Every structure is written in structure tokens, then in C-alpha cells.
Amino acid sequence: GIQVEQSPPDLILQEGANSTLRCNFSDSVNNLQWFHQNPWGQLINLFYIPSGTKQNGRLSATTVATERYSLLYISSSQTTDSGVYFCAVEPEAGNNRKLIWGLGTSLAVNP
Amino acid sequence: DGGITQSPKYLFRKEGQNVTLSCEQNLNHDAMYWYRQDPGQGLRLIYYSQIVNDFQKGDIAEGYSVSREKKESFPLTVTSAQKNPTAFYLCASSISGGLGTEAFFGQGTRLTVV
């Protein structure tokens, strides 16, 4: 089945720094989502981005479907950005609609 | 407010007991899902339902059961057959089970076996 790999696994930033998180996937996808899991466990939708580029405030994401990767950019990071960032994809192959998840990037932003 | 509500937030279970986790959505979504998350891990799919009165096993369905009698509700029962039930459980929904639909999540239920 499709493999989803996220990098780096862990990241520590000083407040105000910028960062790029990466999600590689091994096969074609219908759907790719980025989520932020806050310290209380809530999964918050960041982007629904099977292709192209989107921006929302300090966050932006780009998916290059033909090269099977997606990038999440965080600019001017804040302590509230801390948590785990997950990438999840829905494979194009097969008849199911399941999301396949990466293991996440754990981000800590220090004041 | 529209959204997905999971209850309770925290749940303690004695060994050998069945417990039921509630998931309700008022988004008029057809598809609903249950995931399990263990510490430091990604999410694993337990069961999903693309339409009322129908559901399918996910990757780790053993020891769990679900029902989908109403569009709004998709309760998960953790049975005594589940060997290691202590985990964080997340419910999600999407507008349909079709291709490329965005999934939204509830706040989760943290289950602890005591």
C-alpha cells in the first residue's frame, strides 16, 4: 500500500523563526490534508490540498502531486504553533476512502 | 455551532467491561470514521461508515463494534475482547465517502483501563 513519510520527526524553533515540514507519499492521491494536533489532542484542519498552493495567515502549503510531495510552511512561528503536524492522504488506487497517515512532525516553539 | 461532538472526554474502564464512546455530528455528513491513536503514533482506522446502516472494518477492528442507525451518530463500543484498549480515540466525518473529501475531527476521548 501507499507509504506516507514525514520529515523531520522532531523540530525545535525559537519564536519568530520560519520552518518547512515535508510529506512524501509513494503513490498517486485523490486527497491530501495537513492537520495540527494541539497539546490537548484536538486535530485541527489546516489545509485540504491535493495539488497547488494555499495560504492561511502565517501558514501556507504546496502539494506537487506529480512529484508526490507536499510542504507546509510556518512563518514567524509562535508558541501556540507547538504540537504535532500530520499529513494524511487518500490513495487514488483501490476502492476505499481511507486516509493514510504519516507519523507526524512534533514541533516545539520556545519563547 | 456545527461540528463533531465526542463524549465523554475522559473515560475509565475496569478490565472486562464494555464501554461505549459517543460521536455525534450536525454537519449533515454521510461518512463517519473512528480512529485510535497511541502515544507518539499516527492514527489507525478502526471502523468507518459511508452511509446509514452500513459500516466497514478498518485496519484494527478486532475487539471493537459500531452501529450507524442514524446519520448523525456513530457510537463505538470497546469490548472486553480488546486486549489493550487504553488509547486516545478520535471520531471524524466527511461530507461523503467519495473521492477526495475533507475530513473533520472531534475533540477525542481518552480511554484508560484501570
Image (cartoon, coloured by chain):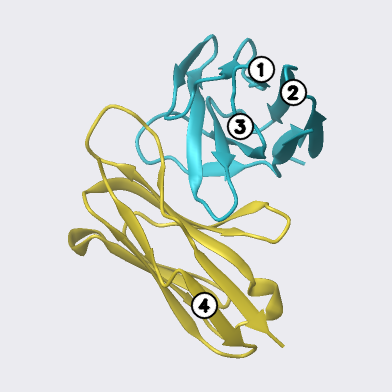
Q: Is residue A17 visible?
A: yes
Rendered-image quadrant of the N terminus of chain A: top left
Label the cyan chain with its letter.
Answer: B
Question: Residue at position x 57%, y 78% from top?
Answer: A58
**Label placed on residue A93:** none
Real-space CA distance between mark 3 and mark 2, rounded to the nearest whole angstrom = 10 Å
Residue annotated with mark 1: B80
- Point out the frontmost of discs 2 and 4: 2
Do callouts 1 and 4 mark residues in contact (Cβ within 8 Å)? no
Is A74 above or below relative to A17? Answer: above
Of all chains, the one bearing label 2 is B
Question: Residue at position x 49%, y 50% from top?
Answer: B42
**Label placed on residue B15:** 2
**Rendered location of residue B85, percent (x, y):** 64, 31
Label the yellow chain with its letter.
Answer: A
**Rendered location of residue A6, percent (x, y):** 39, 63
Kindly state the secondary structure of the residue where label 4 is placed: strand
User: Crowding near pointer 1: few (<14 within 10 Å), some, many (20+)?
Assistant: some
Kindly state the secondary structure of the residue where label 2 is placed: loop
Real-space CA distance between mark 3 and mark 1, rounded to the nearest whole angstrom = 9 Å
Of all chains, the one bearing label 3 is B
Rendered-image quadrant of the C terminus of chain A: bottom right
Residue annotated with mark 3: B84
